[in-house]
Amino acid sequence: MATVEKTIDINQPVSTVYNQWTQFEEFPNFMKGVEDVRQVSDDRLHWKADIAGVDREWDAEIIDQVPDQVIAWKAIGEVRNDGRITFDPLGENLTRVRAVFHYEPEGFAEKAADALNMIDNRVEGDLKRFKEFIEQRGHETGAWRGEIH
């Protein structure tokens, strides 16, 4: 299983950054290749994405969520990926977001994309676009403050 780990500092309070990350259906606005994310329940998401030119759909279960601290998930079914996003306040208006993704590339196209560090670059780009999205808005589009364990 491959791993990507990236961090980015965002000029917004931790609650604003966390709250925006809970708005999963907004992900296509800043995640390249993500076509749709539908929140089925508090702890279930349905994803549609183009991964290295291959259309994929999968469900994910949120397995750990604590406001202003962490959101972690795992894929359900045949697609193999899981991850964890942590939110660390560095000051009143500065938050460090750390993303760790584990995934299993399938097929030639995904394995080639992985070998060329395309997934690594995509995650880095997605975090930069998220930073721009929330910094330009100055506030979150919504929030979910529940906990999942």
Image: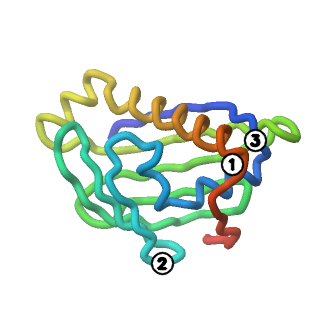
- The way the protein has been coloured in the rendering is rainbow
Closest to the camera, between mark 1 and mark 2, is: 1
Which residue bears the numbered disc 2?
41
**Rounded to the nearest whole Å, what is the CA distance between mark 3 and mark 2?**
28 Å
Q: Which residue is mark 1?
A: 17
CA gap between label 1 and label 2 equals 21 Å
Q: Are marks 3 and 1 in contact (CB under 8 Å)?
A: yes
- Dot 1 lies on which element? helix
Residue in view at x 60 percent, y 32 percent: 7
Give the left or right position of residue 34, taking residue 146 as reference. left
Quadrant, the C terminus: bottom right
Looking at the rendered structure, the kind of residue marked 3 is: Gln
Q: Amino acid at mark 2?
A: Ser
For the residue marked with disc 1, what is the amino acid?
Val
Q: Which residue is mark 3?
A: 12
Tell whether 7 sits left or right of 24: right
Which residue is drawn at the image coordinates 66% and 65% (left, top)?
143
How far from the left and from the top, in percent, is residue 70?
65, 54
The extreme front residue here reads 137
* Residue 60 pos. (x, y %): 39, 64
- Relative image position of residue 116 (x, y in whole percent): 27, 21
Label 2 crowding class (10 Å Cα cut-off): few <14, some 14-19, many 20+?
few
Quadrant that contains the N terminus: top left
Q: Residue furthest left?
A: 108
Q: Quick one: label 3 or label 1, which is nearer the N terminus? A: 3
The residue lying at 65 percent from left, 68 percent from top is: 144
Check the image and report above or below for 125 versus 60. above
Between discs 3 and 2, the one toward the N terminus:
3
Give percent across and percent down for residue 127: 53, 36
Q: Choose between 39 and 60: the one closer to the eye.
A: 39
Q: Secondary structure at mark 2?
A: strand
